[in-house]
Image (tube, rainbow, N blue to C red):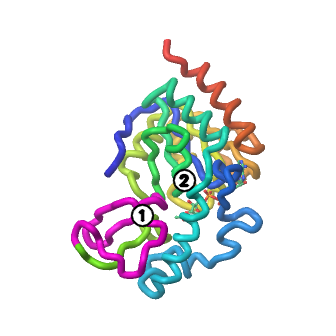
């Protein structure tokens, strides 16, 4: 179900794996990241799941186990505090499949790449809380069809909630990409859309992406840079 998204937020924040790195969750493309240790075509495509569900389910079971004890960090907390001040004038869209934004009190969070803590029935689209391990041929509790999968958007699949996210990006005054390498579309293209619609654009990360559509870059660990940036935005967009 699409979360309630205001069509004209002042700020749209897109987060990626970098914001959860200091909570101990592996990123994808940094040295030693997930995609250095696993082939995408073996674990993160619908074809891989059809061919070898054991391997794919085991990969996501391991990732679920990794995030279960992770705690939100100062960057998640700062964004949540900013949202408490601005309400629906801040829209948070994340590529992350962990629930650390929610654990920091953020609501709603738009999970464009799905959520590790949910299982999905490909037959009827029913979603339910994922068990620690999803067994092969696990039946859907709603329709009984075997073959539950993690509620993750795999390569070659359509990210969630784009019909609500894209108009918000076109309408916002400030767009910020936090802790994302900008390698995966459509998220990587959001900055260009925002800039073309007149938004001021920020990249807040460790390594700059080199994308020319960003007006500002703040380089450094998210737990240091995000609290400062949020404080700036809180003053700028304070309700009058
Ligand atoms: P990446 O691993 O591609 O990029 C992580 C970014 O975070 C890099 O630019 C790092 O410089 C930055 N970073 C690392 N540690 C940081 C820190 N402490 N503070 C700030 N920034 C830090 O991850 P994503 O861009 O999120 O999709 O990856 C996008 C998508 O690719 C993921 O959602 C996933 C993956 O394949 C799917 O699985 C569908």
Task: Indicate whether residue 132 is drawn in magenta.
Answer: yes
Residue most toward the left?
143
List x then y, in percent, for residue 29: 69, 64
Alpha carbon of mark 1 to alpha carbon of mark 2: how far?
31 Å
Residue most toward the bottom?
51
Q: Quadrant of residue 131?
A: bottom left
Q: Quadrant of residue 124?
A: bottom left
Q: As rendered, which of 72 and 85 lies closer to the eye?
A: 72
List x then y, in percent, for residue 109: 46, 44
**Image mark for residue 189:** 2
Residue appearing at x 41%, y 60% in the figure: 118
List x then y, in percent, for residue 96: 55, 55
Quadrant location, ligand no. 1: bottom right
**Image mark for residue 130:** 1
Question: Which residues are the magenta region?
Answer: 115-143
Residue appearing at x 56%, y 30% in the figure: 81
Q: Give the class, few, some or many, for how many residues have Cα within 10 Å of label 1's Cα (few <14, many ≥20).
A: some
Q: Secondary structure at mark 2?
A: helix
List x then y, in percent, for residue 86: 49, 25
Q: Give the class, few, some or many, for how many residues have Cα within 10 Å of label 2's Cα (few <14, many ≥20).
A: some
> If you read the primary sequence from the N terminus, does the residue marked by circle 1 or circle 2 appear first?
1
Residue appearing at x 51%, y 78% in the figure: 56
Q: Quadrant of residue 236?
A: top right
Q: Secondary structure at mark 1?
A: loop
Q: Is residue 147 left or right of residue 124?
A: right
**Image mark for residue 100:** none
Q: Is residue 31 above or below residue 54?
A: above
Q: Nearer the viewer, mark 1 or mark 2?
A: 1
């Amino acid at each position: 179900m699409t979360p309630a998204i205001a069509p004209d937020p002042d700020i749209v924040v897109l987060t990626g794996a970098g914001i959860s790195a200091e909570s101990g969750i592996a990123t994808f493309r940094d040295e030693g990241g997930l995609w250095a240790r696993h082939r995408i075509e073996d674990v993160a495509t619908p074809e891989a799941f059809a061919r070898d569900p054991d391997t794919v389910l085991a990969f996501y079971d391991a990732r679920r186990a990794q995030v279960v004890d992770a705690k939100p960090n100062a960057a998640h907390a700062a964004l949540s505090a900013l949202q408490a001040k601005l309400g629906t004038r801040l829209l948070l869209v994340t590529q992350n499949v962990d629930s650390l934004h929610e654990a920091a009190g953020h609501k709603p969070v738009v999970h464009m790449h799905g959520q590790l803590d949910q299982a999905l029935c490909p037959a009827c689209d029913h979603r339910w809380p994922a068990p620690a391990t999803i067994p092969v041929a696990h039946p859907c509790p709603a329709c009984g069809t075997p073959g539950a999968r993690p509620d993750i958007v795999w390569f070659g699949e359509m990210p969630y909630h784009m019909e609500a996210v894209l108009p918000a990006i076109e309408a916002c005054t400030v767009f910020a990409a936090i802790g994302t390498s900008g390698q995966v579309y459509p998220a990587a293209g959001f900055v260009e859309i925002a800039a073309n619609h007149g938004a001021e654009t920020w990249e807040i990360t460790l390594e700059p992406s080199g994308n020319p559509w960003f007006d500002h870059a703040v380089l450094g660990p998210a737990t240091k840079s995000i609290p400062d940036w949020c404080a700036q935005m809180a003053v700028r967009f304070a309700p009058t």
